[in-house]
Amino acid sequence: MVLQIKNRDARLLWLELQAMCQRDKDRKAAPNRGTAAPQRTHEFGSKQLLEIIHSLGFVQLDSIQITARAHHHILWSRNHRYREYMLDDLISERKVFEHFTHDASVLPMAFYPYWASQFKRLGNRANRTFWGKHLPPPATIEEIYKRIKKEGPLCSRDFKGKADKSVHLWMRPPHKLALDFMWFGGRLATSHRHNFQKYYDIKSNIIPHSIAAVKYDLQTRNNWLCVEALKRLGFATYGEIQKFWDVVPLDDVKKWVATSREIIEVEVQGSDKTYRRYFALKTIKDKLANRGKLSPRLHILNPFDPLIRDRKRLAMLFGFDFKIEIFTPAAKRQYGYYICPLLDKDKFIGRIEVRVDRKKKILRAENIWVEAGQSLSQARMQKLTAELNRMARFTGAHAIEKLL
């Protein structure tokens, strides 16, 4: 018989796989409850942070800083002892690397040998696209590479050149096209970021030789990528497995599912009570039986949080309809520019508009919308206030203005 997974069990499994549940080791009081900048502590450090990134697979990077940048907010949502310097430390320790999944992301350095397909795919795509047609000559690209090799990490501002906006509004300067072309193809790697400005260095200076020297054939890489995607999804369709890393072609995913002995079919109940067919690893039964406990926090999630990235999955499991309206004209927005979902245990109870005034060091809670069938009870308001206080400490705000 096909394993049937009830809706609440599926929601709890998804929360567990997204590192939103707690284990006994996580239930410690947060250090430094004042508003002063947190001191570095061994209670939560590189090892614990790497575990979170590993469990998620990757963390998307984004430059928008309404409260905190997406990558920092995502990590803080998993453990409120996280602080922004911790990811910088992890990058400088070469325990993670930066590249593309569906977008710019940081991934555990141990995953690097499986990323050869992505370097090849994105490098080839750059040559075939509009962007590739405007690359500078190969000799110029080599000059840029040699300069970085000689001088060390450089950013786009270290080169001269202007973008030809007559070609396209989003056109980049020739040197930036060259830098990203080599970065996508794996010749260059991200050394570090300063105020989110990317610094490029040659691969051998960033990727440890013991990691870079490991080579796997295509079948081994595809198998690993599919297995690891399904581990983090719990249950998935062909398309969901393919989109997780956005590396393995869909036809290869289908071949892997057809030939793998690790796969079973399951039926997952949606929020509408309908059961849908998915693929899962045989270990899903153990995952369902050994979950952590739901967090007592009321979470203010980042709009780019991986828990809500797949809008179809979000609606299917939780009955929650969410859209990022950053690129929606202001007059047509239903809620606002940068709106954060509110998660209480395993229910999305609403959404909130929060922003930080960094000059005045004030966190402002400007609007809140409650989902149909949900309410902001006194207990929930207390939890929301506690989360706003935690967010204020995290973002360096010294005061909160609740305009709700």
Image (tube, rainbow, N blue to C red):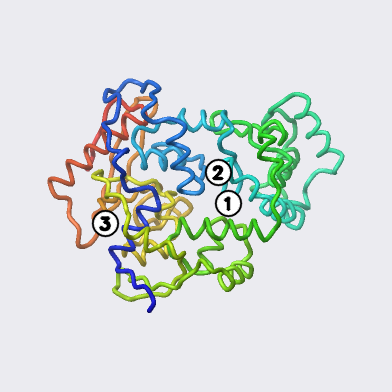
Amino acid at circle 2 = Leu
Q: Residues within 10 Å of mark 3 (few under 14, many from 20)?
A: some
- The three-letter amino acid code for the residue at tag 1 is Thr
Q: Residue furthest left?
A: 378
The kind of secondary structure element at disc 3 is strand
| Viewer-closest of 360 and 347 | 347
User: Which residue bears the numbered disc 2?
Assistant: 107
Disc 1 is placed on an element classified as loop
Q: Where is 163 relative to 218, above or below?
A: above
As drawn, 82 above or below 327: above
Work out how far the residue at label 3 is from the one at label 2, CA to CA, in angstroms.
29 Å
Name which of mark 3 and mark 2 comes first in the sequence: 2
Name the residue carrying label 1.
101
Name, please, the residue furthest toward the right.
139
Residue 370 vertical position relative to residue 88 in the rendered view, above or below? below
- Indicate which disc residue 277 carries: none
State left or right for residue 27 relative to residue 53.
left
Q: Secondary structure at mark 2?
A: strand
Query: Which numbered disc, 2 or 1, marks the residue that appears first in the sequence?
Result: 1
Quadrant for the C terminus in the image: top left
Are the residues flagged by discs 2 and 1 in contact, CB closer than 8 Å? yes
Find disc 3 in the rendering and name its residue: 347
| Quadrant where the N terminus is found in the figure | bottom left
Q: Marks 2 and 1, Cα distance to the nearest angstrom?
A: 9 Å
User: Which residue is painted at 25% across and 55% down in the image?
Assistant: 349
312 or 221, which is in the foreground? 221
Instruction: From the top left corner, tell me how far across and down residue 325 is, in percent.
Output: 43, 53
